[in-house]
Image: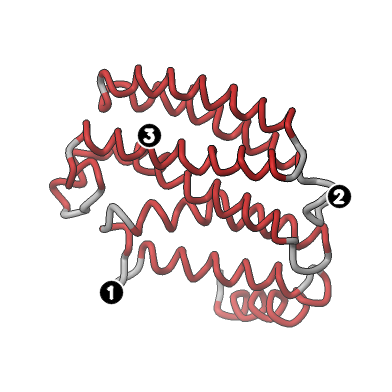
Amino acid sequence: MTLRGRLTTAFLTVVLGPVLLGAFFVGATVAAVACAWAYSAEPVRLKRSGLWGPGLVGLCYEGLPWFTGAAVMAAGAPRWEVVMIAVLYAAGAHGIMTLNDFKALEGDRQTGVNSLPVTLGPERAARVACWVMALPQLGVIALLLGWDRPFHAAAIGALVIGQIWAMRVLLSDPKGRAPWYNGTGVTAYVTGMMIAAFAIRTIGGTG
């Protein structure tokens, strides 16, 4: 893209964005751009950190899209219920990103990227990832029960039980089973997100 094109895009985002889509949408977009820079660009390059790197990606993959969509639908700030669920699922996504790092384990070792599989080893990193994925979902279940959404909470609970079974398989061979878990356990995780979204659509400013 030319310099003129970049300036035009920036103008449309900052000036017209708040009018057409709302200031919260633009704020989330700016935050996403800042996160992308912090993840990849020197001197920060949080990709090298096994703690901050996956957390930042999880925030951008799960938290910001949910927040942005809710802000657009509500034409303003999402309700706190939406924000709480988005934060929990974004936190859990740290574990998903950690498992994703298994495929680059050898390359990360050679290039100095201190992912959790590199610093903790595959077995311990997989256990940490499992706990990080499971605990936020238990928090979501507790919140849904508190908001009188028992059937949605039960459905997510069933998915968590399925994930626990998949986690046991994963832990038997973390490096070899990580791709398999991405197609099973992560699918159940994302399905739970969708159920949570339906559960709060009438109380979260999204419907």
Marks 3 and 2: CB-CB under 8 Å? Answer: no
Quadrant location of the N terminus in the rendered image: bottom right
Q: Amino acid at mark 2?
A: Gly
The alpha-carbon separation of the residues under discs 3 and 1 comes to 31 Å
Q: Is residue 103 visible?
A: no
Q: Amino acid at mark 1?
A: Pro
Which residue is nearer to you in this view: 54 or 4?
54
Left or right of residue 60, residue 54 in this image: left
* Furthest residue toward left: 110
Foreground mark, 1 or 2?
Answer: 2
> Label 3 belongs to which residue?
130
Q: Residues within 10 Å of mark 2 (few under 14, many from 20)?
A: few
Residue 7 drawn at (x, y percent): 62, 81
Q: Is residue 206 visible?
A: yes
Label drawn at residue 207: 2
> Label 1 belongs to which residue?
43
Q: Amino acid at mark 3?
A: Cys
- Vertical arrangement, residue 126 with respect to residue 42, above or below: above
